[in-house]
Image (tube, rainbow, N blue to C red):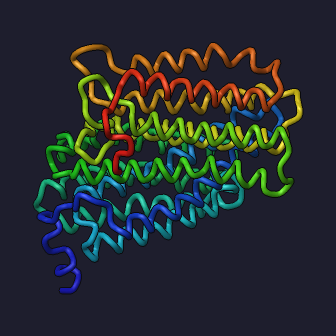
């Protein structure tokens, strides 16, 4: 009886326009998780080069898996009222599960693989299982059942990979994650359960979802400050470290400016503003995945330069320092509405081209100069973008 009372009215509940305090609490775990991911990327740069690609692939897999958890929870809280007790329990349980995943992350492909896999499957299966039961006979329940089917299928592979270990773990987990990504991109079609888009089956608060994306972006941006600040704190200031710290700060400001202020001509809000300018599509979450991944690369790159500012610079570090802004600009370019007046994303894609062309000669420069050049290019893109897309009197838009 108590269970039924908890479930009652879930399908009719609506998400509020603003994010709740519990959702912000949920994000605290991801501050720790992103720091662990950044540490793993930094470790990848110190290994021998013949294993670099495999280690980087493992880090990318874990990062994408962690992102899938956050994005699906944000979608749930934007579809149903997160102030309900049952949704809060799901959020808290997922929060604890994410904490366990973050703790297991460094040894996910080692001794803690089975712990990581079991925790991940419990989180990803438990959420749609409850929604399927709570929304029986409703379109939302049908959608949850479709999501559940896809995650049960991938869960078998996650557990299998956790048990197998070695190369088999990477193969099993890669296939499992590919199943989940394909499912999300195709709106989780399933035999006898339909293939309708999720936006036609549930009412999603675009304003709420946009605010959640903005909040997660700010959390990721803080990682650059944390990495650079922590790297300077222990050895102290020097000329090289100070220049790199300034460059990191310039990069943070440029990221913030481009993310919140870049708009196509004729628009009045950013692609992810709370004013409702978000073009809700299945690609939006994957775009933010690129954005956050780029920011993590920037955090690691500047942190590594501060820790070891002496030349020569490793080519892999150049890839990280310049690849971060490239990923960010590509991801941000897909978060705006298309303009009928001129091709969208032109300026950001020009910035991508400039970064790619400028990267190869950087192996000849000292690490501090490489970090400074990357920050200056980002700052130039932000300035030119601001001149091309003037926002009038609005200079500090709300989340």
Q: Nearer the viewer, residue 164 or 179?
A: 179
Location of residue 334 by image quarter: top left
Reply above or below: 125 against 84: above
**Residue pictured at 23% horizontal, 56% vertical:** 79
- Could you say which quadrant of the image residue 226 lies in? bottom right
The picture places residue 288, in percent across and down from the top left corner, at 43, 40
Residue at 48% from the left image edge and 43% from the top image edge? 177
Q: Which quadrant holds the N terminus? A: bottom left
Which residue is painted at 84% across and 37% down in the image?
309
| In this picture, residue 143 sits left or right of residue 92 | left
Determine the residue located farthest toward the bottom in the rendered image: 1
Number of labelled discs? 0
User: Residue 20, how many percent across, how many down?
Assistant: 33, 66
Q: Residue furthest front?
A: 393
- Image point (25%, 63%), residue name: 131
Residue 113, visible in the rendered structure: yes
154 versus 178 height, above or below: below
363 or 389, nearer to the observer:
389
Q: Nearer the viewer, residue 55 or 19?
A: 19
- Regarding residue 172, the answer to whether it shows in the image is no
Q: Describe residue 272's horizontal placement relative to residue 218 as left or right.
A: left
């Amino acid at each position: 009886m108590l269970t039924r009372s908890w479930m009652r009215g879930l399908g009719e509940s609506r998400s509020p326009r603003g994010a709740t305090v519990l959702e912000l609490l949920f994000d605290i775990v991801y501050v720790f998780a992103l720091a662990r991911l950044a540490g793993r990327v930094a470790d990848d740069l110190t290994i021998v080069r013949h294993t670099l690609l495999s280690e980087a692939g493992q880090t990318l897999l874990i990062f994408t898996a962690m992102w899938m958890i956050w994005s699906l929870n944000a979608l749930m809280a934007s579809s149903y009222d997160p102030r309900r007790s049952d949704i809060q329990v799901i959020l808290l349980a997922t929060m604890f599960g994410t904490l366990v995943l973050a703790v297991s992350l460094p040894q996910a492909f080692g001794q803690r693989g089975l712990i990581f896999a079991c925790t991940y499957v419990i989180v990803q299966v438990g959420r749609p299982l409850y929604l399927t039961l709570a929304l029986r006979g409703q379109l939302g329940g049908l959608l949850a059942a479709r999501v559940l089917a896809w995650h049960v299928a991938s869960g078998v592979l996650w557990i299998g990979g956790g048990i197998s270990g070695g190369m088999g773990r990477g193969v099993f987990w890669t296939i499992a994650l590919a199943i989940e990504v394909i499912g999300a991109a195709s709106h989780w079609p399933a035999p006898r359960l339909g293939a309708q888009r999720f936006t036609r089956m549930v009412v999603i608060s675009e304003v709420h979802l946009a605010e959640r994306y903005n909040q997660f972006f700010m959390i990721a941006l803080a990682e650059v400050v944390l990495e650079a600040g922590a790297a300077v704190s222990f050895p102290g200031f020097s000329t090289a470290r100070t220049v790199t710290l300034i460059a990191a700060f310039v990069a943070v400001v440029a990221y913030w400016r481009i993310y919140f202020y870049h708009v196509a001509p004729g628009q009045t809000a950013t692609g992810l503003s709370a004013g409702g300018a978000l073009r809700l599509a299945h690609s939006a979450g994957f775009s933010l995945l690129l954005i956050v991944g780029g920011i993590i690369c920037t955090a690691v790159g500047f942190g590594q330069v501060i820790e070891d500012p002496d030349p020569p610079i490793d080519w892999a570090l150049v890839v990280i320092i310049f690849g971060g802004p490239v990923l960010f600009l590509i991801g941000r370019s897909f978060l705006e509405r298309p303009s009928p007046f001129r091709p969208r994303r032109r300026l950001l894609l020009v910035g991508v081209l400039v970064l790619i062309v400028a990267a190869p000669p950087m192996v000849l420069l000292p690490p501090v100069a490489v970090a400074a050049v990357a920050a200056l290019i980002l700052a130039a893109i932000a300035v030119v973008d601001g001149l091309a897309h003037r926002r009038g009197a609005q200079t500090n838009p709300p989340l």
